[in-house]
Image: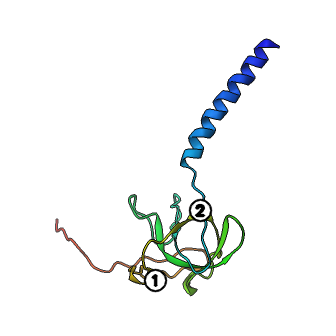
Amino acid sequence: MEIVKIINERLKIAQSHQKSYSNVRRRDLEFKEDDWVFLKISPMKGIMRFGKKVKLSSRYVRPYKIIQWIGQVAYKLELPPEMLLVHLVFHVSMLKKVVGDPSTIVRVETIEVKEELSYKEVPVTILDRQVW
């Protein structure tokens, strides 16, 4: 029984250490209606979403307006019509507050998303050419 008590005490100590480390990094985010937020994208292997396929591409896409507060951690965003198939409600961890005036932010080109959540890439210009 003494060994079990020692193990329990050491587990509690380890858990309190882990909790103190995680609480340092945790931040409570709250947004209001009519706030502007960036939407976080997470690139997945084999799936192309929002035109992001490069390793060092940005993690957040253009700013969107919050239309409704659903709960403590859920917000409804105003998405453009071309993103009609994407669900409107997002978790607070997927959002980042826009600092500054959202009208000064340069918009990303429009992305035509098909029903199966894919799109076609079209090259704009040829930057380099090699002849063998």
- Rendered residue at 43%/79% (across/down): 101
Tell me which label, 2 or 1, sits earlier in the chain. 2
Label drawn at residue 29: 2
SS assignment at label 2: loop
* Residue found at the very far bottom of the displayed protein: 81
- Which quarter of the figure is the N terminus placed in? top right
> In this rendering, is residue 7 above or below 107?
above
Q: Quadrant of residue 57?
A: bottom left
Residue 73 lies, in percent from the top left, at: 67, 64
User: The disc labelled 2 sits on which kind of residue?
Assistant: Leu
Near mark 2 (Cα within 10 A), the count class, few <14, some 14-19 or many ≥20, is few
- Rendered residue at 51%/69% (across/down): 97
> In this rendering, is residue 55 above or below 13?
below
Query: Whole-Å distance between the Cαs marked 2 and 1?
Result: 29 Å
SS assignment at label 1: loop
**What is the tally of numbered marks visible in this picture?**
2
- Which quarter of the figure is the C terminus placed in? bottom left
State the residue position of label 1. 110
Q: Quadrant of residue 28?
A: bottom right
User: The disc labelled 1 sits on which kind of residue?
Assistant: Thr
> Disc 2 vs disc 1: Cβ atoms closer than 8 Å?
no
* Residue found at the very far right of the displayed protein: 1
- Rendered residue at 38%/59% (across/down): 56
Q: Could you tell whether 10 is left or right of 2 in the image?
A: left
Label drawn at residue 97: none
Q: Foreground mark, 2 or 1?
A: 2
- Rendered residue at 59%/62% (across/down): 29
> In this rendering, is residue 49 above or below 18?
below
Residue 40 lies, in percent from the top left, at: 52, 65
Residue 130 lies, in percent from the top left, at: 18, 68
Near mark 1 (Cα within 10 A), the count class, few <14, some 14-19 or many ≥20, is few
Front one among 93 and 124: 93
